[in-house]
Image (tube, helix red, strand yellow):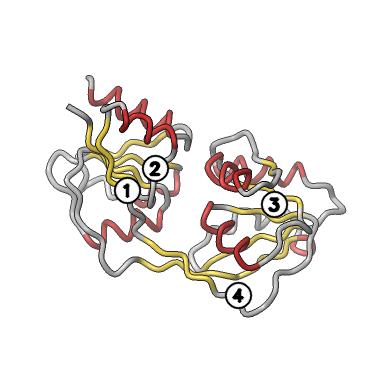
Amino acid sequence: MPISIYISRDKPGPFFESLQNRGFVALTCFACIDLIADMPLPPPTADWAFFSSPGSFVLFSKKWDCRPYRLAAIGSGTGEVIRAAGFEVFVPKSSDTKKAAAEFANHVKSTETVMTPVGNKSFRRLKGLIPAERLREYPCYRTEARAEIPMVEAEYFIFTSPSNADAFQLAHLPGAGQYAVAMGNSTFAALDSTTWKKVFLSPHPDEESLWEIIRTHASA
């Protein structure tokens, strides 16, 4: 029997898609939030553009030209989306978001400036790491919970961000025997451990690490 898994993204990555095609998992995928573009002003000029999520890059690149910037991203998933769009991107090695932000800040030269798109619920990961006179935050979107979030009959629920976790938990209480898996410490903190059977923290944000947690637990 395939393991039933929900992922708070509108589509799975290639690794989980392969597992589903081979009958190992049964996937349900949809995001619990929408990123709404709000860009009345053009972005500031800078040497770097730093993206904290795939969605922030997609929204930004739909309206503005990324070519004037060198691009950087937190997380391999965001990096993959940027590369798929045809750009080179610097992705810090660490999967811990705080360490990754510090790694990027150390990579940037003392003479360079950084522009980073932010939303109403964004973590200001570079604040305090890059001097204020060289950091140019660009408010350009807002995060809103979707009006309808269906309940899912799954054994494992993978949450990709705190906003997705918050939106789902406001809409539903988990059923008995349902487990949550968090991508990142911030998402782990957003999950209510008193309502889930157990909450797991993935050591890395890639799909292989998420699957290893689920496979190991399910086969125990």
Q: Are the residues tagged 2 and 3 within 8 Å (C-beta)?
A: no
**Of pointers 4 and 3, the one earlier in the residue sequence:** 4
Q: Position of residue 61 (x, y in %)?
A: 63, 61
Regarding mark 2 in the picture, which secondary structure is present there? loop
Say above or below: 178 vs 218: below
Say whether marks 1 and 2 touch (CB < 8 Å). yes
Question: How many numbered marks have been drawn onto this rendered protein structure?
Answer: 4
Looking at the rendered image, the disc whose residue lies closer to the viewer, 2 or 4, is 2
Furthest residue to the bottom? 40
3D distance between C-alphas at marks 1 and 2: 7 Å
User: Residue beneath label 3, please?
Assistant: 129
- Dot placed on the residue nearer the N-terminal end, 2 or 4: 2
Image location (x, y in percent) of residue 100? 62, 41
Quarter of the view holding residue 164: bottom left
Indicate the amino acid at tag 2. Pro
| Distance from Cα at disc 4 to Cα at disc 3 | 25 Å
Label 4 or label 1, whichever comes before in sequence order: 1
User: What is the quadrant of the N terminus in the image?
Assistant: top left
| Nearer mark to the viewer, of 3 and 1 | 1
Q: Which residue is mark 2?
A: 12
